[in-house]
Amino acid sequence: MLDVIDRLPQTGDKGINLKQQLKDKLIEYKQYIDKYGRDMPEIRDWK
């Protein structure tokens, strides 16, 4: 997803903001996994 945003310059500031939100979420996921040893419920219970 991050690569797609980079390839679409017309996304402008919205693209920059979205990239930051995605990066922040990835950090949050990693921290949760490091702490609990499993995926977050929103990933684990996804259908």
Image: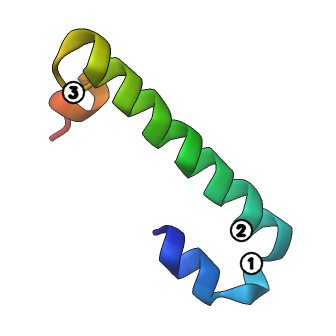
Q: Residues within 10 Å of mark 1 (few under 14, many from 20)?
A: few
Residue that numbered label 3 is attached to: 39
Residue furthest out toward the top: 36
- Closest to the camera, between mark 3 and mark 1, is 3
State the residue at coordinates (71%, 68%).
15
* Residue 11, numbered circle: 1
Q: Residues within 10 Å of mark 2 (few under 14, many from 20)?
A: some
Assess whether mark 1 and mark 2 are in contact (beta carbons under 8 angstroms): yes
Secondary structure under badge 2? Answer: helix
Q: CA distance from mark 2 to mark 3?
A: 27 Å
Residue 31 x %, y %: 39, 23
Q: Earlier in the sequence, mark 3 or mark 1?
A: 1
State the residue at coordinates (50%, 38%).
25
Residue that numbered label 2 is attached to: 15
Dot 3 amino acid type: Asp
State the residue at coordinates (62%, 46%).
21
Residue 22 x %, y %: 54, 50
Dot 2 amino acid type: Gly
Q: Residues within 10 Å of mark 3 (few under 14, many from 20)?
A: some
